[in-house]
Image (cartoon, rainbow, N blue to C red):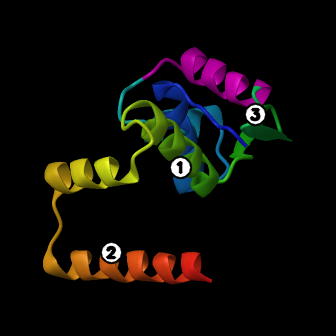
Amino acid sequence: MDVAFTERELDVMTVLWDRGPATVAEVRERLADPLAYTTVLSVLRTLEAKGYAGHAEEGRAHRYHALVDRAVAGRSALQRLLGTVFGGSPELLLTNLMETRGADAAELERLRRVLDAHASEEER
């Protein structure tokens, strides 16, 4: 499944992933950038039209919830980034990540274990 969000859509989806089902007002409260109620409502309706969010009626309000798993969205975004920015090269992506973010010794060891486990799976 190819999942693509605008920046605003991703902000709203992050609230739904972190908080769980929420009304427009509750989503609006959690956003870092203040947006008008109607803007948040519009983003939620767009996400719903794309099949990324749904809602349940709750009195006069709607309680919106994510229909796309955060991990699925992350994999889709990473595939797009890998293909467009890094020319399909996982090595270039990892090199840039380490140069930009860095990692302490413990994190590097965890990454080595993940890479070793992946290499072992590929050999099978």
Disc 1 target residue:
74
Which residue is the extreme one toward the front? 123
Tell me if residue 39 is in the magenta stretch: yes
Q: Position of residue 63 (x, y in %)?
A: 73, 41
Q: Secondary structure at mark 1?
A: helix
Residue range in magenta is 35-49
Quarter of the image for residue 49 reads top right
Disc 3 target residue:
61
Vertical side of 72 occupied by 28: above or below = above
Q: Secondary structure at mark 2?
A: helix
Give the amino acid at mark 1. Answer: Gly
Vertical side of 60 occupied by 88: above or below = below
Quadrant of image for the C terminus: bottom right
Disc 2 target residue:
111
Q: Disc 3 vs disc 2: Cβ atoms closer than 8 Å?
A: no
Quarter of the image for residue 76 reads top right
Instruction: Please give left or right for residue 62 compared with residue 81 in the image.
Output: right
Vertical side of 83 occupied by 102: above or below = below
Q: Name the residue at 71% across, 40% down.
A: 64
Instruction: Please give left or right for residue 28 compared with residue 106 in the image.
Output: right
- The span from disc 2 to disc 1 (Cα, nearest Å) is 18 Å
